[in-house]
Amino acid sequence: MSEPIPQKKRILALDGGGIRGVFSIEILARIEELLRQHYGRPQMVLADHFDLIAGTSTGGIIGSFLSWGEPVDRVRKLYEENAGAMFCKAPWWKLRGGLFDAANLSAFLREFFVEENGTLSTMGTARLKTILLLVMRNASTGSAWPVTNHPGAKYNARVFPDGTVNSECNLDFPLWQLVRASAAAPVYFPPEHVELGGRTHSFIDGGITAYNNPALIAYLMATLPCYGMSWPQGEERMQVVSIGTGITRAKVSEFLRRYVNALSYAAVVPSGLMESISKEQDMLCRILGRCLHGGAIDSEIGDLIDAAGDKNFTYVRYNREFNQKEILAVETKYGGKFALDNLKMRDYLIEVGREYSQHVQLSHLI
């Protein structure tokens, strides 16, 4: 007889990171395996356990599949079968939009996220099994857009409290376009332009916000009254499981530091900022929540697992740093840079993900 899932609000948050998302998938597979064993439900999917799934960029793609009700093995196969098409080099006449042609990724998502009758699914579709949070940046307004399908969200209302009709209800955005928009990494992919209510919204990757690691914004949206969910807080009432795509420190070589002008540092500024902000989001979650597992924030702060005080949720952070020696070895063996678009290192990332997934413990999840 299968055991019922305890009543606790559960959040799963998935970082961005391009092809490094396959590292995250292996951790997700271990989580699903342990939950299936514990509850005696061999067909259980993560959408049966988590109430809210949040994702940015590649995490948004993975999270959308999971919220759709797909088992992790199916998500793994989708990545295996479509990664090459996703990272298809753009022809020379399209290079102004990005290094990669978004047509294949768009077609894949458009064909996947459809209703039973074949019509395109919107953010408000009933086919999503959980609350889904996708993070993107609205380049038209210059603001971060964490968008959910929760009916209580302000901009998910059809009519505002003052009686004004909302002609741009977020629930009406095509789901596939929001997923694609969340993964529209500048330089790599062109922006996603979405027409709604007679206006064009141009979206770029959610990594160009403070929420490439979406764990903290997921918690805030679940609990702050302005977002319409107002979930109860406390260690016995809420859980946040956050999964990264691996840490690569943005360092400047000695040669650049000594001999090259300041403009050369520009190459490491975006990745350096993203790494720092993601680490800060992780640290804040460990301060607000009871950290059950996670690597050290740094050599001074440590992992904060024993941090005292009342906590608003339990928190787990699964992530792994790739040191410079490992990165050099991978680049030498597989060719190319240790970058989010290097498909050659996919098998290595899968292997490392499976090794790291042994950190996942059932006690972290229930």
Image (cartoon, rainbow, N blue to C red):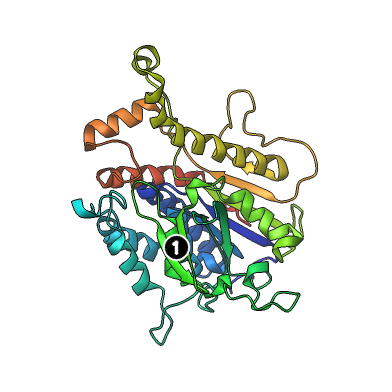
Q: Amino acid at mark 1?
A: Val
Question: Helix, strand or loop at disc 1?
Answer: helix
Residue 283 rendering spot, x and y as whole percentages: 63, 38
Of 116 and 240, nearer the camera is 116
Residue placed furthest toward the top? 258
Of 168 and 128, nearer the camera is 168
Residue placed furthest toward the front? 198
Residue 138 rendering spot, x and y as whole percentages: 51, 56
Q: Is residue 256 left or right of residue 65?
A: left
Image quarter where the N terminus lies is: bottom right
Residue 41 rendering spot, x and y as whole percentages: 52, 70
Q: Is residue 130 above or below residue 214?
A: below
Image quarter where the C terminus lies is: bottom right
Q: Is residue 68 left or right of residue 314?
A: left
Image mark count: 1
Residue 9, quarter of picture: bottom right
Residue with the mark numbered 1: 179
Residue 51 rendering spot, x and y as whole percentages: 61, 65
Q: In percent of the image, x 42 and y 54: which residue is there?
A: 58
Q: In percent of the image, x 56 and y 51: which residue is there?
A: 214
Q: In percent of the image, x 76 and y 61: which residue is there?
A: 225
Residue placed furthest toward the bottom? 117
Residue 284, quarter of picture: top right
Residue placed furthest toward the right? 310
Evaluate whether residue 69 shows in this view: no
